[in-house]
Amino acid sequence: MTLPSPAELIPRMATDLRNYLAQRGIDSPRFVGIHTGGIWVAQELLKALGSDEILGILDVSFYRDDFSRSGLHPQVRPSELPFEIDGQHLVLVDDVLMSGRTIRAALNELFDYGRPASVTLVSLVDLNKRELPIRPDIVGETLSLAPNERVKLRGPAPLVLERTLLSTAL
């Protein structure tokens, strides 16, 4: 199976998102990308939408429920939300949705900043391996992979989806 190109997925996602927001009467959403791949996807989506909106950035490392098991990643960066969260319609963007735990962590962090009017979830890829009841509103591609396979987004330019195999060695 050949992985789709983000350059092909993002324009369609932008159209789907524009329609989704219009159906809900949302005309000025605030975009928030999850570090790192979600930021890249959000930047490309904003370009495809012809928007120069400021992008909020979340690093959810401290909000992960597996923090004690996996430890602190050495590249933790502070989140940057250059706008109010209270009452805003947010578009939360991630690159690959797998278990749903990253999105849960992102929602926890966002609600620590305030109470948004709504959150629309956008994901470039959905691996459909959820452990939590979280589904994207807009998705570029849903993939079915073998249990030992994962997908990683490489970037920032050009964006490329790459299939990886988990190590079976202990």
Image (cartoon, helix red, strand yellow):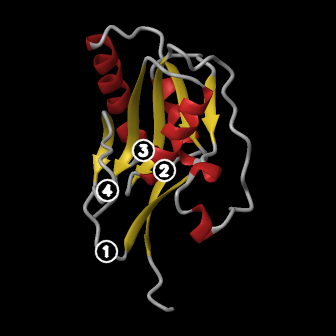
Residue depicted at 32% across the width and 31% down the height: 12
Asked if residue 71 lies left or right of residue 107, the reply is: right
72 or 22: which is nearer to us? 72
Type of the residue with mark 4: Arg
The disc labelled 3 sits on which kind of residue? Pro
What numbered label is drawn on residue 147? Answer: 1
Q: Residues within 10 Å of mark 2 (few under 14, many from 20)?
A: many
Residue mark closest to the camera, 1 vs 2: 2
Judge the density around disc 4: few (<14), some (14-19), many (≥20) Cα neighbours within 10 Å: some
Q: Nearer the viewer, mark 4 or mark 3?
A: 4
Q: Give the distance between the C-alpha atoms of the residues marked 1 and 2, in whole angstroms.
A: 19 Å
Q: Which mark is residue 130?
A: 4
Q: Earlier in the sequence, mark 1 or mark 2?
A: 2
Disc with the residue nearer the chain's start (4 vs 1): 4
Q: What's the CA distance linking mark 4 and mark 1?
A: 13 Å
- In front of the other: 163 or 75: 75
The crowding category of the residue bearing disc 3, from other C-alpha atoms within 10 Å (few below 14, some 14 to 19, many at least 20), is many
Residue appearing at x 52%, y 47% in the figure? 159
**Label 1 sits on what residue type?**
Pro
Q: Quadrant of the N terminus?
A: bottom left
